[in-house]
Image (tube, grey):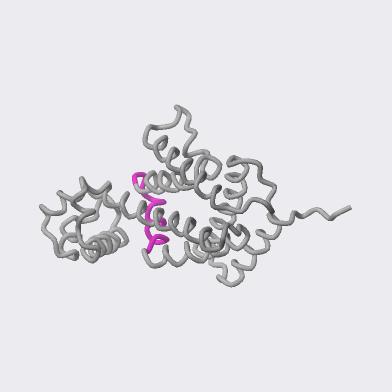
Amino acid sequence: MPTDRFYHLPEEKKRLIREAAIKEFCRMPLEKASINKIVQNADISRGSFYTYFRDKEDVLEYIFGDVISQVQNFCIEFLIREKGEFWRFPKALLDYTINICETNKMFTLSQVALGNRTMMQLLQKKISGMMGGPFCPKVIQGKTGQPAGLAQEGDKADVMFQKLYQLTDCSKLRINDVEDFQELFSLCIFNMVMTIGEIYQKGVEKENAVKSFEKRIRFIQYGAAKGG
């Protein structure tokens, strides 16, 4: 992750560095991406770069982590603003996630990541850190146990779920504890990921994909079984 010196930079300078790195990572595979291009486009020296980041992988991890942090902040702010109303939350989160990922070219980076082991591991790490075990069980529960890095990300996810659970009005939900909340939240996230995949991988029209998303949310909310 970036050094403290990077975080003390003016916001505009951090934005320029982030955008320069995203541009380069979208242009070239990670192993061929040029630090010289990044520093040139960000208008910083190569020496300054290494006072902010260890290497290219460190920059990439920061980019993914920054987007995840913004999504997490949105979740908290939305539930506070909506006084814990849960069922308006999934669609709002879908809209926000699509917008922020398009703005930061995350879908392009993710496509590049599919062909790059290092980038894919970083992407999986950040997603599992945001959503926890039920969202990404294969990443967290490996054959040789949970790697230390993912364990730390999992700890952050636990704190995040506790916060969201506390902010949610569970009086109208069949929720008994934070574990139940995590299961419900994960179902909604699976739905969101499916929808994003339909749009950006399968080429489904966004309007149609969103309609399917909302239909699946209704099934989650009300169930599919008829009464009686």
Query: Residue at point 15% right, 63% down?
Result: 40
Residue 170 left/right relative to 10: right
Q: Position of residue 20 (x, y in %)?
A: 24, 63
Quadrant hosting residue 87: bottom right
Q: Position of residue 49 (x, y in %)?
A: 16, 53
Outermost residue, right side: 228
Query: Residue at point 58% right, 72% down?
Result: 207
Query: Residue at point 59% right, 40% down?
Result: 179
Instruction: Say if 12 sits above or below 155 in the image.
Output: below
Q: Position of residue 51 (x, y in %)?
A: 15, 49
Query: Residue at point 60% right, 46% down?
Result: 181
Which sits in the foreground, 161 or 129? Answer: 161
Residue 209 left/right relative to 28: right
Residue 46 left/right relative to 11: left
Which sits in the foreground, 23 or 62? Answer: 62
Q: Main secondary structure of the magenta part?
A: helix
Number of marks in the rendered image: 0
Q: Position of residue 72 (x, y in %)?
A: 45, 54
Q: Is residue 114 magenta?
A: yes
Q: Is residue 167 magenta?
A: no
Quadrant hosting residue 204: bottom right
Q: Magenta stretch?
A: 105-118
